[in-house]
Image (spheres, grey):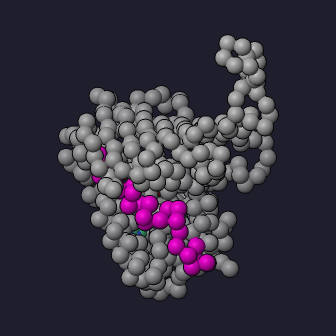
Amino acid sequence: MSIRAGFIGCGGHAYRNVYPCLKYADVDLIATCDLVEGRAVEFARTFGALRSYADHHEMLEKEELDAVFVVTGYDEQNKPLYPPLAIDSMRAGCHVWIEKPPASSVEEVEQMMAVEAETDRFVLVGIKKAFFPTIQRMKEITEREAFGGISSIYLKYPQYLPDEDEKQLATSNRMRGFLDHIVHPGSIIDHICGKIAHLSYERSPNGAGVVSMKFASGATGVLHLTCGRAGTSPLERVEVVGHGANVIVDNGVKLTYYRPGSRGPGGYGKATNFVGDDDTAPIYWEPEWSLGQLYNKQIFLLGYAFEVQEFADCVRENRKPTRGSLESARELMKLYEAFHHPPGQIIPINST
Ligand SMILES: NC(=O)c1ccc[n+]([C@@H]2O[C@H](COP(=O)([O-])OP(=O)(O)OC[C@H]3O[C@@H](n4cnc5c(N)ncnc54)[C@H](O)[C@@H]3O)[C@@H](O)[C@H]2O)c1
């Protein structure tokens, strides 16, 4: 059964990465909406919507919709526009899919949560990295008995960390850039490791930095903010270590699972062959770039199609999402707000 959807926002990201996913999730696009005259009309023609609007209130009033997608961005104060638009949409009876960053504070996320409860609708936040095929598999591997539970995580991400002067102006472009991107590694951390108990960080003069995290589970983690890396370099690497096993996602698409096992026979100083048995050998996955398969489309590789599919399934089945939920969004905002504190301190995130 297809769901009837409206779409607020007809900009660059929506055009490239979100509207194209709708057809893979059985979403019937009924209406588009954008403040800029002509954009909604053009998008309706391109993506097959029946009607277009320049005001979301009018769209919500006139159309009978199950769901609304919102891909808008920021207001003049550099605050994400998602909380008020999601609240209006829920109060009009719709479930809502919003882009990241969901908000600029824990408080705003909690306001959306209150309206979820009041209206019995839900919000799913498009935290794409938790929907990457490689990260989905990484998560599943870390939950296997053989992995032995997570002991630590390492993430590399090329984030600029604003300095103390830049942080004073919460609405600066530097803080907006930080908010815009910190949710990316943050969503992997939250999805894989759960709640952070506390963290501390240090900043290099160029805005690079290192964040040390302790999780509520007892595991530890390092987030390496690699501002200063070459523009020619891949952006990311994630490694999760269990007990006798570890799993790595490199560049978002290469997954290596080092299963429990050992190399060739013989003890230290005696083993002559580094190659071990097949049944404990590392497992390695990477895309092939030959076939016209859906899995080779960037909207699948980068998780967009999966986050839209998950949302549409949740609407059809009337179940609240777990991945991309507002509970997760609140953890992302706690992470963001932690950096309002200066470096060199232990900053509580979730006290036990
Ligand atoms: N997940 C990702 O990989 C990814 C990548 C790029 C951008 N984004 C996010 O996507 C969002 C949009 O980014 P963009 O670069 O496409 O911005 P954009 O400025 O190109 O598009 C935003 C559109 O929303 C419209 N809009 C704003 N307020 C509106 C309102 N109240 N009603 C109707 N239309 C409204 C604007 O007129 C504009 O056309 C941002 O939140 C950004 O962080 C996510």
From this view, report whether residue 141 is shown above or below residue 86: above
Location of the N terminus (image quadrant):
bottom right
Residue furthest top as drawn: 269
Residue 24, image x, y percentages: 67, 65
The residue depicted at 31 percent of the width and 55 percent of the height is 351
Range shown magenta: 314-339
Residue 152, image x, y percentages: 49, 40
Q: Does residue 116 show up magenta in the picture?
A: no
Residue furthest front as drawn: 267
Location of the C terminus (image quadrant):
bottom left
Q: Does residue 333 show up magenta in the picture?
A: yes
Q: Quadrant of residue 147?
A: top right
Q: Quadrant of residue 19?
A: bottom right
Could you say which is closer to the camera, residue 135 or residue 173? Answer: 135
Could you say which is closer to the camera, residue 40 or residue 241? Answer: 241
Residue 95, image x, y percentages: 49, 76
In which quadrant of this rendering is ligand 1 seen? bottom left
The residue depicted at 39 percent of the width and 66 percent of the height is 82
From this view, report whether residue 239 is shown above or below residue 326: above
Magenta stretch secondary structure, dominant = helix
Residue 193 visible from this viewpoint:
yes
Residue 10 visible from this viewpoint:
no
The residue depicted at 66 percent of the width and 72 percent of the height is 26
From this view, report whether residue 214 is shown above or below residue 103: above
Residue 143, image x, y percentages: 60, 52
The residue depicted at 50 percent of the width and 62 percent of the height is 324
Q: Going by the image, does 336 lie left or right of 245?
A: left
